[in-house]
Image: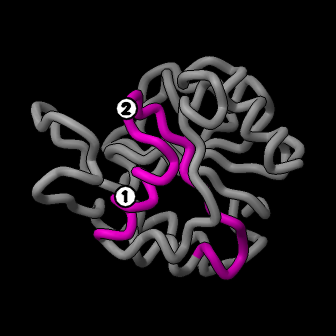
């Protein structure tokens, strides 16, 4: 595993509930995705963890507040979003701004997300390691992109430390 791991927020770490208006931090109910707490607790022993969100309304502080409601904030070193990068996912400039802020080279960072188009392909194109969270292997997936069906699988990989993909 790389020394830095970026996670998408909605439907990767926390369940996105379409139709619920406003910022997730203000929703009446929020929910961590299955295995999220355990995966981050395992992974934080080997890597610095960040959220890279495409949320249009939420600030980094809003994201952190929502993460706190499900016990994920303690594992996350920071949050990136449109407000603090100046760009929106999937624009590669979003991810370049993240790399620049972290002072990291692409090969030192892994992106974990549920959207091939917004999370995985832009990062793969920049040279980051990528892991798609998907129930099934998408057809025509470029080589070098990992696929997991659940965050539990990521947690199992994390237990292997730096030998994990």
Q: How many marks?
A: 2
Check if residue 163 falls in the magenta segment.
no
Where is residue 151, by image quadrant? bottom left
Task: Please identify, in this view, whether the residue under mark 1 or under mark 2 is nearer the observer.
Answer: 2
Query: Which residue is label 2 attached to?
Result: 57
Check if residue 46 falls in the magenta segment.
yes
**Horizontal placement of 17 versus 83: left or right?**
left
Tell me where residue 121 appears, x and y as whole percent: 60, 25
Where is residue 162, by image quadrant? bottom right
Where is residue 96, by image quadrant? top right
Tell me where residue 123 appears, x and y as whole percent: 67, 31
Disc 2 crowd, CA 10 A, few/some/many (<14, 14-19, 20+): few
**Horizontal placement of 126 versus 58: left or right?**
right
**For residue 150, which numbered disc appears in the image?**
1
Front-most of residues 12 and 78: 78
> Residue at (29%, 53%) from the top-left corner?
25
Asked if residue 132 is positioned above or below residue 125 in the image, the reply reads: below
**Horizontal placement of 126 versus 44: left or right?**
right
Tell me where residue 74 appears, x and y as whole percent: 51, 76
The CA distance from mark 1 to mark 2 is 27 Å
Question: Can you see residue 146?
Answer: no
Q: Quadrant of the N terminus?
A: bottom right
Q: Secondary structure at mark 1?
A: loop
Asked if residue 55 is positioned above or below residue 158 in the image, the reply reads: above
Disc 1 crowd, CA 10 A, few/some/many (<14, 14-19, 20+): some
Q: Which residues are magenta?
A: 43-69
> Residue at (73%, 23%) from the top-left corner?
125
Question: Can you see residue 89?
Answer: yes
> Residue at (54%, 25%) from the top-left corner?
89
Asked if residue 129 is positioned above or below residue 85 in the image, the reply reads: below
Q: Quadrant of the C terminus?
A: bottom right
**For residue 10, which numbered disc appears in the image?**
none
């Amino acid at each position: 595993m790389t020394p830095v791991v970026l996670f998408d927020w909605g439907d990767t770490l926390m369940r996105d509930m379409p139709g619920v208006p406003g910022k997730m931090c203000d929703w009446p109910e929020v929910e961590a995705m299955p295995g999220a707490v355990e995966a981050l607790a395992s992974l934080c022993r080997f890597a610095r963890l960040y959220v890279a969100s495409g949320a249009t309304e939420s600030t980094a502080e809003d994201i952190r507040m929502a993460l706190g409601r499900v016990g994920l904030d303690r594992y996350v070193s920071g949050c990136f979003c449109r407000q603090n990068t100046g760009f929106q996912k999937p624009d590669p400039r979003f991810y370049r701004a993240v790399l620049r802020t972290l002072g990291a080279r692409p090969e030192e960072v892994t992106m974990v997300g549920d959207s091939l188009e917004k999370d995985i392909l832009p990062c793969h194109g920049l040279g980051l390691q990528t892991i798609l969270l998907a129930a099934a292997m998408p057809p025509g997936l470029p080589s070098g992109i990992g696929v997991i069906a659940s965050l539990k699988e990521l947690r199992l990989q994390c237990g292997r430390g730096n030998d994990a993909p």
